[in-house]
Amino acid sequence: MTIEVTVGEIEAPKRRRGVPGLAIVRSSAGLQKATIVIGLILVAAFVIMAVFAPIIAPYGFSQTSSDGVEFARQAGPSADHLFGTSVRGEDVFSRVVWGARTALLVIGVSLVLSIAVGVPLGLLSGYIGRWVDRVLVLFMDAMYAFPSLLLAVVVSIVVAGGQSSSFGGVLSAAVAITAVFVPQYFRVVRNATVSVKTEPYVDAARVTGASPLRIMFRHILANVTQTLPVILTLNGAEAILTLAGLGFLGFGIEPTSASEWGYDLNKALPDISNGIWWTSIFPGTAIVLVVLGMTMVGESVSETLNPVLRTRRRAKDGS
């Protein structure tokens, strides 16, 4: 007796097409629509500021003079310095703008590295199982048990060779934050893989002699990564907070390497008691607005893509 399997039978179910963005705005209503619109505006402003930082910022992120004239230190907001100057004589507005570029680079690199490591390991662990699954789950659970900021600090010290004062660079900060996110992607993908690896289309692929790697990356991957856009958005907000925490504690990017909002907040602490508010309020506001925007987008995308939440919202609106 022979078993005939057509190509269509071994293909994984087609995912619903669509990119979170305008389609989600159109499918939203009421407060949720206002939330995602505001969130998208804040995120778009952050991205524009980061991409066009050399054009928007009037000075360099560590520039303390112009045309041979030194900037006044801790000068209040004025026409020449919209957000005033810092204790080192740097233009605060330029530091805030360049800090957006640093944050965007760190977010991008850390999320790409997290996906590149966490997703394949989750697929491998969930599909193969046995001792491979037990070892990976034990290791990831151990990492996940650490508070995120503490884990990032530990990794940053390791990357810096135990010398926190010399720790600098976007890539080094991104690696420290990657260690926080890898267990999250691993757990999501691993649990989803365990639930779909017994589906008929996976069994059909095995019958046709497909290799485990082909089954994992051709048939399973497309059906276990549907929640990643939501996680990516929320992790972007967490990455900014973690980066700011590292900078505030002195384990972040060196001021000579790039502008970083957490570092600026740390240096502005003595200014608060002296009534110098501009060196801390503007970097702090930038952190709050970007994190708020990304969180609003992430929560709205989650509610829109989650069929259970979407059904509840529609039932509530119709009642």
Image: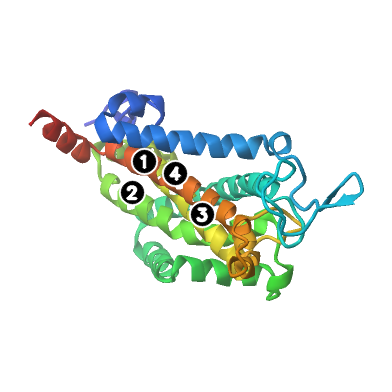
User: What amino acid is found at the position of numbered circle 2 in the picture?
Assistant: Thr
**Does 73 appear above or below 119?**
below
Mark 1 or 3, which is nearer the eye? 3
Q: Earlier in the sequence, mark 4 or mark 2?
A: 2
Please say if 132 is above or below 55: below
Q: Earlier in the sequence, mark 2 or mark 1?
A: 2
Name the amino acid type tagged 4. Met
From mark 3 to mark 4, how far is it between C-alphas? 11 Å
Residue farthest along the right direction in this orientation: 68
Could you tell me which residue is drawn at 55 percent across and 46 percent down? 112
Mark 2 → mark 3, Cα distance in angstroms? 26 Å
Q: Amino acid at mark 1?
A: Ile
Q: Which residue is mark 3?
A: 239
Callout 1 environment at 10 Å: few (<14), some (14 to 19), or many (20+)?
many
Q: Which mark is residue 210?
A: none
Please name the residue shown 36% across and 25% down the image: 23
User: Which residue in the structure is indicated by mark 2?
Assistant: 193
**Along the horizontal axis of the image, is 39 left or right of 311?**
right
> SS at mark 1?
helix
Q: Position of residue 174 (x, y in %)?
A: 60, 55
Q: Residue furthest bottom?
A: 162
The residue closer to the viewer here, 256 or 228, is 256
Between the residue at mark 1 and the residue at mark 4, the CA separation in whole angstroms equals 29 Å
Q: CA distance from mark 4 to mark 2?
A: 28 Å
Secondary structure of the residue carrying tag 3 is helix
The residue beneath circle 1 is 220
Identify residue for label 4.
Answer: 294
- Distance from Cα at disc 2 to Cα at disc 1: 7 Å
Q: Residues within 10 Å of mark 3 (few under 14, many from 20)?
A: many
